[in-house]
Image (cartoon, rainbow, N blue to C red):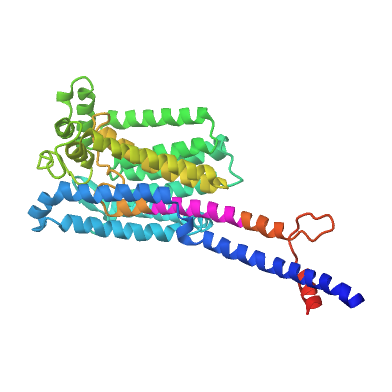
Amino acid sequence: MADQNQAPQFIDDDYTLRSERQRPRSAGLSAERKNAIWNTLDKPLLIIVGMLLTLGIMMVHSAAFDWSLAEFGSETTVLVNHVFNVTVGLVAMLIFSMLPPPIVRRFAIIIMLMAISFLIAVLLFGESRWGARRALLDSRFQPGEFSELATIIYMAAWLGSKNVRVRSVTYGLIPFVVLVSIVSGLVIAQPDLSTAVVIFITSGLMFFLAGADIRQIVVSLLAVVIMGYTVISFKLLPPYAVDRINTYVAGITDLTQTSYHTQQALIAFFSGGWTGVGLGESHQKFLAIPAPHTDTIFAVIGEELGILGASVVVLLYLAFIVRGFQIAKWADNAFRSLLAAGVTIWIATKAILNIAMWTALLPPSGLPLPFISFGGSSLVVLLVGVGLLLSIQRQTIIQRNTSERRKSVASYDRGGRDRRTRVPRSGRRRIGEEAVS
């Protein structure tokens, strides 16, 4: 009778042990599915960037088919090259999206040294074009573009470290000014003022987000203003840059006195009206607007797609900014948060400056519109930045899923006398399994 009484208890124990063994396995499989690459990629960010890239492919062909035919004998040569660059950029984006942020942080110093070396190399061996040395490898690689992202990575690693004292003048402000001055100075020497401005704005905002004192920011801004005034006063800028500044100042009160290129871009916007003249029907892109498929492509968008089409582009950039800062907010440590914020600020700055330049709000300069303008190294570097954003968000999701899995596994084991949740131990399971056998 004793055996008969024990049999049901024995069967119940066996059922409980099997139940405890099986449930965590299913939870583990579920966690593995959740942590798969596709499931952890940020879909809203991918959709936003995909829409911008698609619009860019469409507008590059529309803006450059005539020039492509005249220059290369085919209307699609520029389009094919742009699609190739987009493909290379997307591959780079996916690779960096799978790269854990700690690895990027570990190589931050090396990346920064590489950027400085490339900037020195372009001054010594770069190809001179229109009075500037900005490219290497037959104009396929522009170190200035790479230095923008390298500075962001290094700043995030430095400002995100536990030992840095951002509010200290000696250990915070002075190292920041020295680093930004070295990089910006090498870029200005090319000369490439727009890239230097992007580096300064992005670095300054990252420094502020890391906890810098507002007085330090004010001092830095005053130093930049004084330095800019000195450069202009002593005529250290190239003649074309001085002319752009002079015409911009004159055009503030009278648009007819602004630069020829800005006037042509404004004519394109006025011609487009609210709905545009139609895709491919722009007239200003034929000889009137300089580089319609690169720097001034926003003017072509305004003429062909109208104010409504241009507004959609602006909204896409706003959506990108919001999503980027959300990723930065959700990041679980200072480095990832600063890196995500830095990449977002960087891309937002380039977009805002380009749009402002060709709507007569700022002097014109050679700055491409992110994800839309034709570009080689510029487009690839931008998509690498997007890959870093995706990587940061992936790590956030993976850690969240791992935390949920641990809680789920712990909740299955309530074998204590007080019925509290505890994580099962393998040793206890082996003892139970031996008892079953």
Give the answer, above or below, for where 153 lies relative to 95.
above
Q: Is residue 198 visible to the viewer in this orientation of the structure?
A: no
Q: What is the residue that sits farthest to the bottom in this orientation?
A: 437
Q: How many marks?
A: 0
In the image, is residue 161 part of the stretch drawn in magenta? Answer: no
Magenta-highlighted residues: 384-402
Give the quadrant of the C terminus.
bottom right
Q: Residue at x 52, y 57 (%)?
A: 106
- Is residue 397 part of the magenta span, yes or no? yes
Q: Nearer the viewer, residue 234 or 315?
A: 315
73 displayed left or right of 166: left
Q: Position of residue 315 (x, y in %)?
A: 34, 37
| Residue visible at 43% across and 47% down in the picture | 151
Residue 175: % across, % down = 50, 41
Is residue 54 in view? yes
Q: Is residue 58 left or right of residue 349?
A: left
* Quarter of the rendering containing residue 2: bottom right
* Residue occupying the point 16% across, 48% down: 62
Q: Position of residue 405 (x, y in %)?
A: 63, 58
Toward the right, the furthest residue is 2
Q: Quadrant of residue 321?
A: top left
Quadrant housing the N terminus:
bottom right
Q: Identify the residue at image location x=17%, y=55%.
A: 78
Secondary structure mostly seen in magenta is: helix
Q: Nearer the viewer, residue 261 or 352?
A: 352
Find residue 71 and report its horizontal and vertical position in percent.
Answer: 10, 54
Q: Nearer the viewer, residue 132 or 336?
A: 336
Answer with left or right where residue 269 lies relative to residue 93: left
| Depicted 37 relative to depicted 392: above or below | below
